[in-house]
Amino acid sequence: VLLEQNEFDQAIESLNHALYLNPDFTLAHFALVNIARARGRFHQAGRHCENALRCLRRLSPSQILPDSGGMTAGRLAQIIGSLKARKAAG
């Protein structure tokens, strides 16, 4: 909800709190990727990508991510990979 309202600072705080409680909450890492990219903080986004990928490597590619609406770990890894490839090309 905070992201939809462009309340980035509050969203970051909430996501960091969620990660404190559950460091393997991959979707929180991915949300931080998107916030950092939207703010032009690409180095930060890269760190968050690596954190998300580290979590995803522990899962089966076919495993559904909690709170994802049915997205698999493999699909999110592909999305993150394409973001990293675009950054490398740009």
Image (cartoon, grey):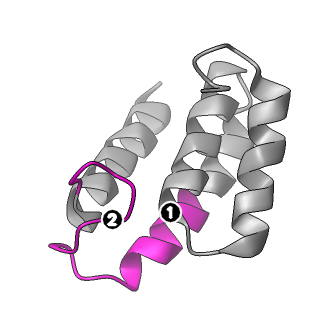
What x and y, as percent, mark residue 25? 55, 67
In the image: residue 35, left or right of residue 85: right
Instruction: Report the residue that reaches farthest toward the left.
Output: 62
Q: Residue at image x 74%, y 30%?
A: 41
Residue 84 sits above or below residue 7 on the image: below
Looking at the rendered structure, the secondary structure element under dot 1 is helix
What x and y, as percent, mark residue 75? 22, 55
In the image: residue 20, left or right of residue 70: right
Q: Which image quadrant for residue 72?
A: bottom left
Is 29 contained in the magenta span?
Answer: no
Q: Residue at image x 85%, y 29%?
A: 9
- Front-most of residues 57 and 26: 26
For marks 2 and 1, give the CA distance: 8 Å
Which region shows up in magenta? 49-71
Residue 36 sits above or below residue 76 on the image: above
Q: Are marks 2 and 1 in contact (CB under 8 Å)?
A: yes
Q: Residue at image x 39%, y 56%?
A: 67
Q: Residue at image x 38%, y 80%?
A: 57
Question: In which quadrant is the N terminus drawn?
Answer: top right
| Dominant secondary structure (helix, strand or loop) of the stretch shown in magenta | loop
Q: Which mark is residue 26?
A: 1
Looking at the rendered structure, the secondary structure element under dot 2 is loop
What x and y, as percent, mark residue 68? 34, 52
User: How busy is the neighbourhood of tag 1: few (under 14 within 10 Å), some, or many (20 plus)?
Assistant: many
Q: Amino acid at mark 2?
A: Leu
Is 63 contained in the magenta span?
Answer: yes
For disc 2, the marked residue is 65
Q: Which image quadrant for residue 22?
A: bottom right
What x and y, as percent, mark residue 65? 33, 65
Instruction: Report the residue that reaches farthest toward the top.
Output: 5
Q: Earlier in the sequence, mark 2 or mark 1?
A: 1
Q: Amino acid at mark 1?
A: Thr
